[in-house]
Image (tube, rainbow, N blue to C red):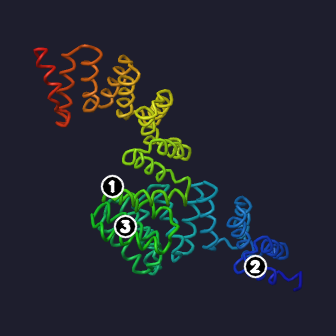
Amino acid sequence: MDPRNAEAHFDLAALLEDHFKEYDLARKHIEAAVELEPDNDAAHFNLALLLTSHFSEHDLARTHFERALAIAPDDSMTLYQLALLYDDHLNDEKMAATNYERAIDTDPFNALAHASYATFLSNKAHDYDKASIHYQFAMDLDPEDADHLNNMGLLMQHQFRDYEKARYYFEQAIEKDGTIADIHVNLANLIDAHFSELTLAEQHYHEALRLEPELARAHYDYAVMLSYSQNRLDEARSHFEKAVALQNDHASALRELAILLTEHYKEHEAAWSLFERSIATEPNNYEAHLLLANLLDDHAKDYEKAMHHYVRAMAIDPGNPNTFCECAVMQMQSLKQPQKALSNLKHALELDPDHAESHARLCSLYISFLNDISLAKHHYEKAVALDEEYKDLLTEQIFSEAGL
């Protein structure tokens, strides 16, 4: 090969990257092509793609995309790839939007630009109407692409709450390409949650796992259905465990497995460990802190750690009365701190005057610790009025004996 032949370096780099996966050597040759022909926009473009895809050198990739655009300013694919770079790696939403729009303006038939811009509009700009327009353009331009249909289905499901349309798009996506496991999972989730066709949902979970047995989200979502919709707990446990084994930082799988272990299998120590792993992955997950605090209070009797997690939950969601109520229960029953419990229960009712559990707990507190039967009755009546499940004959007998 003539070492001064830029075209030869260019072609060899493409061969090494695409067929032999020899990225370092491909980089050497594409850089040689750029050096020999600095005005070759395609060489700059390919070097930029290589740098961002295989070396994570995103700033240098941007430089070469920009050099390609200086040579060919109306190249829609370069504008599109630069928009993706700003969107996915450089975290510059303004420049991402600008370049998506430029890519579409220079080539209105660029389906990939429409689709990626739509995803950006949905996930980051939260302009769902505009996102739906660009997904529609992408589908019209490339009607055989299952991903465009799938993304429109997700938009219909999660943002427009139009479950019939979402189902239509997922089913159309599967008709176009039934080999994409994620789309089967999306349809299964939708059918389970909004159509209650559990047999059909299960068929799609099975197909997803047949296509991609190591897909953690398929195991997780299937386990959720097995646990909550069908009460098939042993099977649910198996799939939660598989999801965690495949993705050890899957916070939701760790948390749901912990809930299952503590509520149904009474394996509290194992659940404790899983909650801690979930929190390590998602430190600001309110539910994980609250559930771990309850577990530490009820079973580990580690009240100091329990209080730590109650306080963390309060900081994460200070407007949630459940945390203050649950913490008050520990202060009342385990720590024998009635005044602190009273303060937290009053605060819970400040947040939500109709929080029935807090009224019920105040009833117990006034009877057992503060010796104020009149106030106890007031909160008892409030709790029962809000939820008749709090009606209790023994409590009413106490009021009767007190002449109330």
Residue at (42% x, 81% y) in the render = 176
Most foreground residue, 273 or 112: 273
- Mark 2 or 1: the one toward you: 1
Q: Is the residue 254 above or below the residue 122 in the image?
A: above
Per the image, label 3 sits on a secondary structure element best described as: helix
Q: CA distance from mark 2 to mark 1?
A: 50 Å
Residue at (27% x, 23% y) in the render = 362
Q: Position of residue 172 (x, y in %)?
A: 37, 77
Amino acid type, mark 3: Ala
Q: Residue under label 1, please give it.
A: 228
Q: Which image quarter: residue 358?
A: top left
Few, some or many residues within 10 Å of mark 1 (<14, 14–19, 20+) = few
Q: Residue under label 2, please give it.
A: 16
Few, some or many residues within 10 Å of mark 2 (<14, 14–19, 20+) = some
Q: Is the residue 294 above or below the residue 204 in the image?
A: above
Residue at (43% x, 50% y) in the render = 256
Q: Residue under label 3, please give it.
A: 188
Amino acid type, mark 2: Leu
